[in-house]
Amino acid sequence: MFLASIPSPDQGVWRIGPLSIRAYAICILIGIVVAIWWGERRWAARGGEKGTVLDVAVFAVPFGLIGGRLYHVATDYHLYFGEGRNPLDVFAIWNGGLGIWGAIALGGVGAWIACRRRGIPLPMMADALAPGIILAQAIGRLGNWFNQELYGGPTDLPWGLELYQRIDPATGLEDQINGIAVDHTPIAVVHPTFLYELVWNVGVVLLLVWADRRFRLGHGRVFALYVAGYTLGRFWIELMRTDQATMIFGQRINVFTSALVFLGAVAYLILARRGREDPALARGTTPDRDGSTGATGGDSGGPGFAGGTAGTDAGTGTARDDDRPGGSGPGESGSGGTGSGDSGDRAAVSVAPSADVNSSSGGSGSAGGSDGGGGDGGGGGGGD
């Protein structure tokens, strides 16, 4: 009898007639919704328009789900191919099995397509989404608890996870994912490595929010910090897991993947540009806009840069790259007058586009200061 341990749910699937309600799928969906909601708020704080993140998600989420499944099948092919296996189970995504590396890679392709259509920088969007993505991964890990998967070796620690024998009532056969617990007598008490990853991911969320506000990270560095933080935790968690996996040189394949991706993320953090992008870039360009608005300023007689309007005579302004001191540079062309800049915690200054925006000759435009900070507080994983 175990004095203290974490019980597993009796089941992870509830059937209502022909309909199967799966806890794993619910956790993934909740994570996606949370990531989009928080991403919208962070994108707006960076100067973007509401609804942009949802537009990006329309491409990124399906691409990410496909990529996550492909990675899982490629690295755990023994579950689907070979004697006694059914290759059609590759498409049974509701049974669990999503690899985060494939989800990020192919999801990034989908996000790039959407960002290109909107005329906004992908790194800027990635920075806004990063905390929400890893929070969604943490929520998704709860689905592994319902599926009785992603665990480590035996333990007598008070937070050990009880595993129960589950029987599928439709077939009478043992089935840990689709079955129901026979009783509450544990067949094993193991390390809940899915829970370790959940807690680690929440810690990375807090790190990202703090670092983004403290250092005003931009140009993809928030996303790189997310990748570095996640892979660091995934490395040691993979070493604890005992569930079946593809092995290379005696180690789980995701140990090597985590190490390589971690090194790449750290290199990006070191080499990427400092500071944060101009908020005007977040407005992007869409088919119903012309070159007189958005990040590129206006033609003669059009609106000025970043919300302000500019004079018609040639002049000079002060170039400014977010919160770094700027030098002098030519202003943009536009109609005479003045306009208010973006809201922020600094006084509005006369600016010309920095390295992020191509400037043209003309008067000086008026733009605001910061984009309002790094975030609003507090992003799907599962399967691998």
Image: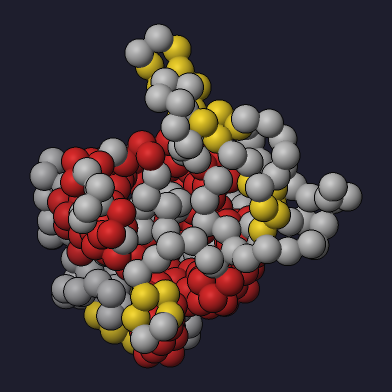
190 horizontally vs 310: left or right = right
> Quick one: 298 or 122, which is closer to the camera?
122
Quadrant the C terminus occupies: bottom left
13 horizontally vs 85: left or right = right
Q: Going 39% across and 44% down the picture, which residue do you hit?
A: 96
- Whether 155 is drawn above or below 6: the answer is below
**Mark count:** 0
Quadrant assignment, res 183: top right
What percent of the width, then of the height, locates residue 203? 65, 64
> Quick one: 93 or 279, which is closer to the camera?
93
What percent of the width, then of the height, locates residue 85? 25, 47
118 horizontally vs 162: left or right = left
Q: Is residue 364 visible?
A: yes
315 horizontally vs 254: left or right = left
- Whether 293 is drawn above or below 7: the answer is below
Quadrant assignment, res 227: bottom left
- Whether 343 is drawn above or below 180: the answer is below
Q: Going 47% across and 82% down the picture, which residue do you hit?
A: 324
What percent of the width, then of the height, locates residue 233? 56, 73
Q: Going 44% across and 32% down the picture, which residue do you hit?
A: 173
What percent of the width, then of the height, locates residue 149? 52, 51
- Whether 280 is drawn above or below 57: the answer is below
